[in-house]
Amino acid sequence: MNRRSFVTGSIGAGLSALGTVVSQGEVGAVESTTPIAPKASGPRPNVVIILADDLGLGDLSCYGATKVQTPIIDKFASQGIQFSDAHAATAVCCPSRYSVLTGRYCWRTALKDDCIFGHDTLLIEEDRMTIGSMLQSAGYKTACIGKWHLGFGRDYPDWNGELKPGPLEVGFDHYFGIPVTNAQKPDVYIENHRVVNLDPKDPIRLGADSKTNKMTGGTAARYNPEELCMTETAKAVKYIETTDKSSPFFLYFTPSNVHAPFTPHPRFHGKSGCGLYGDFIMEFDWCVGEILSALDRAGVADNTLVILSSDNGAPYERVSWDRGLRANLDYLGQKTDIWEGGHRVPFIARWPGKIPANTQSNELICLIDLIASIADIIKFPLPHDAAPDSVSVLPALLGRQGGEKPVREGALILASYEGMLAVREGPWMCILGVGSGGTMTDYSRHHEGFSLEETGMTTTGWARQGCMADPKLPRGQLYNLETDHRESKNVYEDHPEIVERLTNILIEYRAHGRSRT
């Protein structure tokens, strides 16, 4: 059974805990069909988005990492703009990637928490505009290479036949990559609509459980994990070098680095001094260099906007932690958590002649804003029902500094692995629930990762009583990130007027089915 057929329609743990009543009209539905808008006019740069998997701010030396070095990405950052307050919309990969491509919060779909797996169907609605379909209608060639993790098919993915609908039905002319994470089955490559190298005499069979990691068959089609990055990178390089340059192109490149299990190619083993996790980071740095070099060789680097980011924060890993690597710097939390370490991500952009070199920005932006920002660049008129939560942050991308108002007006809604929601506006972060909403404090559903106690970090927004949250805790959390970026002091009960205002913003965004004006 498709897991989304039995996902509840709740807004998440946070609002449930607060007892807030909201409209349920949008659950699992497309508000309306998305017409194709007229072709855009204006500058038409190539667009390359490099979306890493589970890469933390503290994994890159340009953000302050000292235990690993990423010289290629450091040089790339010096050629453009580097953001310190960029966020994924969700602190876990699959729903984050839905928001990247659609400009829509994933909690508006049936997937309120968790991720999808090998049994799950296409999460993106086929008539919903994506970055890919928008650029297609503007005359771009489009490709997705790397991890997809947004499902295949309508009723059940046919791993032994045609995997349709998939990336090609939601905006991409070409797809090559892996269907789920490198930790899940099936561990095969997909090209366009079919599994690569599948022997029909040895069909793929997955276990009955929707989250199963059991697979039989498909022996000839299985990939070597240590070759994943090499293969994905080679495919992306070939696409850049061979695609027809008579019209612009969009490459959505999503390598498997640095998601666990950590399987760098042997040439990187032992190079970082921080175990396989650090070596995987170094391989990613190499991979970025290959993409940038391909743009140079193809003669298109000067007319290409390249964006590098991550789908969520990093999970802490014991070997690298013991050797001093702090993957999320000193931010509280890790992948899956509603705290900053779960969703604050690296974000670097380069566009020669448009983005000033060696620029730093502390503007608040989100990956959900990519589609509206790219539409703004090419002067594409977004239909009203497209990208309902995406805001153009183009002025910030172009290095605007010190305006009277933030470039991203309105509040940003963030989500955890467990479906806990938070509202960010200016310096205020209001979390509608207790604890992290993820691995650091909730052991009931997900047991990997570090507990808060193990990290030595502290916050008054959490205290344990046995295996449960301390009942004396406030029912929500409020932090002023301007004065307390580590989220150490919960001031929820000190500012009820701010809590009420931010909670009402979420209710309004939920009821209207959109936050973009």
Image: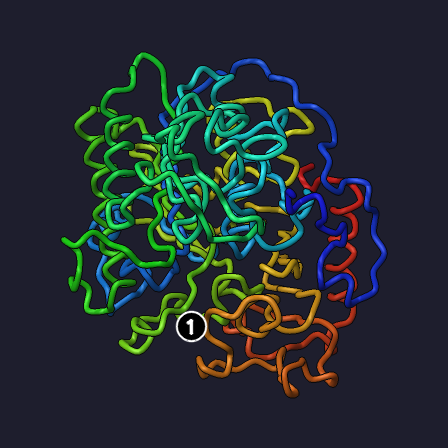
Quadrant housing residue 123:
top right
Colour pattern: rainbow
Circle 1 packing at 10 Å, graded few (<14), some (14-19), many (20+), is some
* Closest to the observer, 104 or 175: 175
Q: Under tag 1, what secondary structure?
A: loop
> Eyeballing the image, is 306 above or below 457?
above
* Farthest residue, direction front: 201
At label 1, which amino acid type do we have? Asp
Left or right position of 438 against 30: left
Q: In which quarter of the image is the C terminus?
A: top right
Q: Indicate left or right for 260 with 101 as reference.
A: left
How many numbered circles are shown?
1
Residue 258: name its quadrant. bottom left
Q: Tell me: residue 295, above or below residue 210.
A: above
Specify whether 208 is left or right of 328.
Answer: right
Picture residue at 52% right of the left edge, 82% below the top: 458
Q: Position of residue 146 (x, y in %)?
A: 37, 39
Q: Residue at x 42, y 50 (%)?
A: 310
| Screen quadrant of the N terminus | top right
Q: Is residue 307 among the parts visible in the rendering?
A: no
| In the foreground, 252 or 71 | 252
- The residue indicated by pointer 1 is 330
Q: How far from the left and from the top, in percent, is residue 406?
A: 56, 50
Please tell me which residue lies in front, 498 or 401.
498
Give the percent coordinates (x, y) of residue 459: 56, 80
Q: Residue 130 at what x, y percent from top left?
A: 55, 30
Residue pictured at 47% horizontal, 69% vertical: 448
Residue 150 showing in the rendered view: yes
